[in-house]
Amino acid sequence: MGALSLMFLLGNSIKAALKPPVLTTYVEIDGVDFGPFDNIEGMEKFARDGFPLAANTSFEKIRLSREFVTSPSLYLWAKNQTSRKFGPKDIHLITENEEGYVVSRKVLQLCQPLSFLVESSNPSLGGFNEVVDLAVQSVSTF
């Protein structure tokens, strides 16, 4: 009976050890933390050297989206960036594990907003969905 109990305990601990890691990616621009984003699309469009895979293109689109809008809003940054005709900016993507340790740093270089929106996603709960599409010229990994 003791061996069976030990096997049961070991089996449970092995399953717990194989759970997928929880990673959170934060967006930072000019030292300002814009909070975590749920979804980042388009990173696969860049080669290992950081430049777009597609021939004869100087940029690719990367989409940042999240279900909850924090303060400051990336939407407002994109709106101001577009209306005031500021030059391209570097955007830092900092990925942390559930213990808060940085596991990855990427820099989206020379970015300009293409489109941006905030929409109500669950009005009864006061939820919002924020989406910002960026033109990105290259990606660096640190």
Image: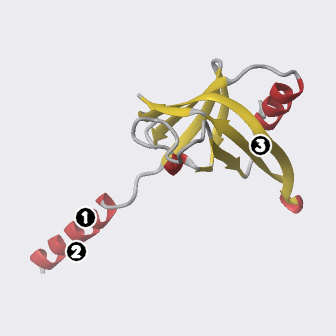
Residue under label 2: 8
Q: Is residue 114 visible?
A: yes
**Residue 6 at x, y percent in the picture:** 16, 70
Label 2 packing within 10 angstroms: few (<14), some (14-19), many (20+): few
- Name the residue rendered at 41%, 35% in the picture: 49
**Residue 88 at x, y percent in the picture:** 69, 23
- Image: 127 above or below 8: above
Badge 3 element: loop
Q: Specify which label sits upstream in the sequence, 1 or 3.
A: 1
**Residue 121 at x, y percent in the picture:** 82, 59
- Name the residue rendered at 37%, 60% in the picture: 19
Badge 1 element: helix
Q: Residue furthest left?
A: 3
Residue under label 1: 14
- Name the residue rendered at 62%, 50% in the picture: 38
- Frontmost of labels 2 and 1 is 1
The numbered mark at residue 69 is 3
